[in-house]
Image: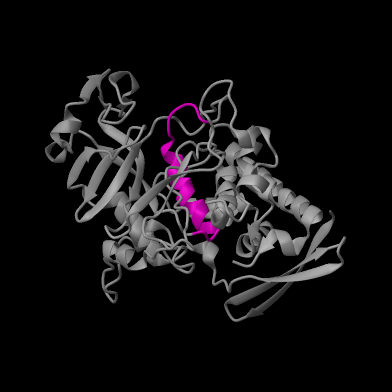
Amino acid sequence: MKFKIRVVTVSVASLTVTFLFLVLDKHNQTFKITTNVERNILESPSLASVASPSQTQSPVDPWALWAEWVKVDSFYTSDAFWSSDMNVLLNALASTPITAFDVGYKGTQLKATMQLGTQKTIFKPKRYPREVIIEGDPCKGLDMHTAEIVGFHLDGILDFRIAPPVAGRKINLNALRNVTSKALLETYFTQDDNVCFYGVCLYCKPAEAVCADGDLMEGSVTIWLPPWYELATSRHPYQRTYIEGRKARWEMDENYCKDELLNPTSKYHKDILEYTDTCIFDFLMGNADRHHYETYAFASNLSIKLVHLDNGKSFRNPFHDELSILAPLRQCCRLRRSTWTKLLQLKQQGPLSLILERSLKRDPLYPILTQENLVAIDRRHRLIIDQVMKCIDQYGNSTVIVDR
């Protein structure tokens, strides 16, 4: 299907409102898409500029801010993502003194729990250099700490706002020994004058240890959710088998969604839009490892949001687009209007990689992504829009684009 975008921009003082008109030639229909009012969001202040509040301002308590922001269906408001308050929170993750360092929560990958005063966080250590390319199975290998950082920023730019804030940080393992738990210390050793540890997890062992550069270790710090936000884990309907030579049904049957998700009696039916939102998020990053997902444990049956946690298996190969990640969108052909609108806005305002880079500059470990990975994000953005247009061409806009 051919389509074009007409743009009308109206400026008043420092405010700019852009109107996008999506014209679908085949159906001779025009859909107006109005962006949010923007106030120089792409020129957000750096972390350094908000690290020390001015004398005329009361210091912001980042942990109280976080506790106030978190709601069942979002972790902060749209305005908060580019705000100085968000920069205060990210700066706190990157610089607040560490008061406890312990083994991570359950899982298959090495991680550590890091206490920043009263706030619990999760530390994922650097496993690969930024320019690494992992070919073959998109799920193999170890987590990338940079992927966790990018996941938060991309989620916010897409306006999903359901990924907890993440910041990069370097920690001194020797300096932390006095606050490190016995369980974690027992996994420490020295190799070639570098401090190493292998932690406690399903696959954690000395052969899979991570080593610092001397005693300085780079990693990502993810803020933990408030105690009341309990998570429930569910199997993803598009889970892979993880058995060599054996494919899941959805990989072989293009009618899988029609039979299993679009069927009103299916337990997955009410969450179709969550699966398509998440597959777009994952495809942009190349994350093919969404085998389970987390939601708020006490959400109503009619309202759940898939929390965008554990994004470490992303950015493995910038020269390969894992199209299987888009299976929920391709097979179901359903998408939230707000997501479709945002994808088109980002195409007009972008490229997406430029907007992402501007946000990532707030991180103390910047640069986070290689140029090759940034190019891949823009290419995948175009592929997503092409897939949605194919769905609209086949089923019509009113069927594909859903108002909720």
Q: Residue at x 62, y 37 (%)?
A: 250
Image side of residue 332 versus residue 230, left or right: right
Q: Position of residue 47 (x, y in %)?
A: 38, 57
Q: Residue furthest front?
A: 265
Q: Is residue 134 left or right of residue 33?
A: left
Which quadrant of the structure image shows residue 92? Answer: bottom left
Q: Is residue 381 visible?
A: no
**Residue drawn at (46%, 26%), measured in percent from left and top?**
141
Magenta stretch contains residue 150: yes
When the figure is inspected, residue 15 is found, relative to residue 44, above or below; the finding is: below
- Residue 130 percent across, percent down from the top left: 48, 34
Magenta-drawn stretch contains 199: no
Q: Is residue 361 above or below residue 147?
A: below
Please give left or right for residue 268 compared with residue 46 in the image. right
View extreme (bottom): residue? 12
Q: Nearer the viewer, residue 313 or 395?
A: 395
The quarter of the rendered structure image containing the C terminus is bottom right
**Any part of residue 125 in sight:** yes
Name the one closer to the observer, 401 or 357: 401
Residue at left offset 26%, top offset 30%: 199
Q: Return the x and y of residue 24 as percentages of the image width and height.
A: 82, 62
Left or right placement of residue 30 versus residue 15 in this view: right
Task: State the residue in front, 387 or 65.
Answer: 387
Of residues 294 and 128, the one nearer the viewer is 294
Q: Picture quarter containing residue 20? A: bottom right
The location of residue 191, given as percent across then percent down, is: 26, 18
The residue range painted magenta reads 139-160
